[in-house]
């Protein structure tokens, strides 16, 4: 956790207890916890929106490719187009 070990964490908590006092410290911890939870919810919502947009883009690009790609539309038994490398004569 940010390179902070147990001794450093205990020192920070002890200093906070001395500076803020026993009455304010639980209040501060509660407020900090609520703030972090709200931040996590907001970042999760943003991540979900990006995933949804990515999915929509992938879905639309596959649909567009299937509609515009002559290889996808042609039947399996038809000859290749005239300008394809498969249609050239072998010498």
Image (cartoon, rainbow, N blue to C red):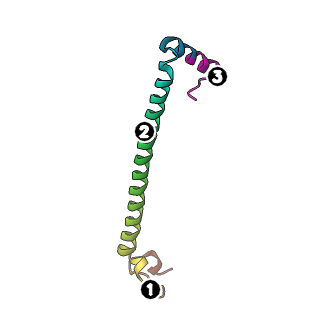
Magenta span dominant secondary structure: helix
Q: Left or right? Give the position of 10 relative to 46.
A: right
Query: Could you say where residue 86 lies in the image, as x and y percent from the top left?
Result: 47, 78
Q: Residue at x 38, y 65 (%)?
A: 61
Which residue in the protein does label 2 denote? 38
Q: For the residue labelled by badge 1, is the local secondary structure a helix, a strand or a loop?
A: loop
Residue positioned most to the bottom: 77
Query: Could you say where residue 15 lies in the image, as x and y percent from the top left?
Result: 54, 13
Magenta stretch: includes residue 12: yes
Q: Residue at x 49, y 26 (%)?
A: 29
Mark 3 is surrounded, within 10 Å at the Cα level, by few (under 14), some (14 to 19) or many (20 or more) other residues, namely few
State the separation of the CA atoms marked 1 and 2: 55 Å
Q: For the residue labelled by badge 3, is the local secondary structure a helix, a strand or a loop?
A: helix
Which residue in the protein does label 3 denote? 6
Nearest to N terminus: mark 2 or mark 3: 3
Query: Could you say where residue 55 lies in the image, as x and y percent from the top left?
Result: 42, 60
Q: Which residues are magenta?
A: 1-13
> In the rendering, which numbered label is found on residue 75?
1
Q: Residue at x 55, y 27 (%)?
A: 2
- Vertical relation: 2 (above or below) 74: above
Nearest to N terminus: mark 1 or mark 2: 2
Query: Could you say where residue 58 lies in the image, as x and y percent from the top left?
Result: 42, 62
């Amino acid at each position: 956790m940010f390179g902070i070990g147990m001794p450093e964490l205990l020192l920070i908590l002890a200093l906070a207890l001395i500076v803020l006092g026993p009455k304010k410290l639980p209040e501060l911890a509660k407020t900090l916890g609520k703030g972090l939870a709200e931040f996590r919810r907001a970042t999760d919502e943003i991540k979900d929106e990006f995933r949804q947009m990515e999915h929509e883009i992938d879905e639309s690009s596959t649909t567009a490719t299937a509609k515009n790609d002559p290889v996808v539309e042609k039947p399996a038994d038809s000859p290749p187009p005239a300008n394809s490398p498969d249609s050239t004569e072998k010498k």
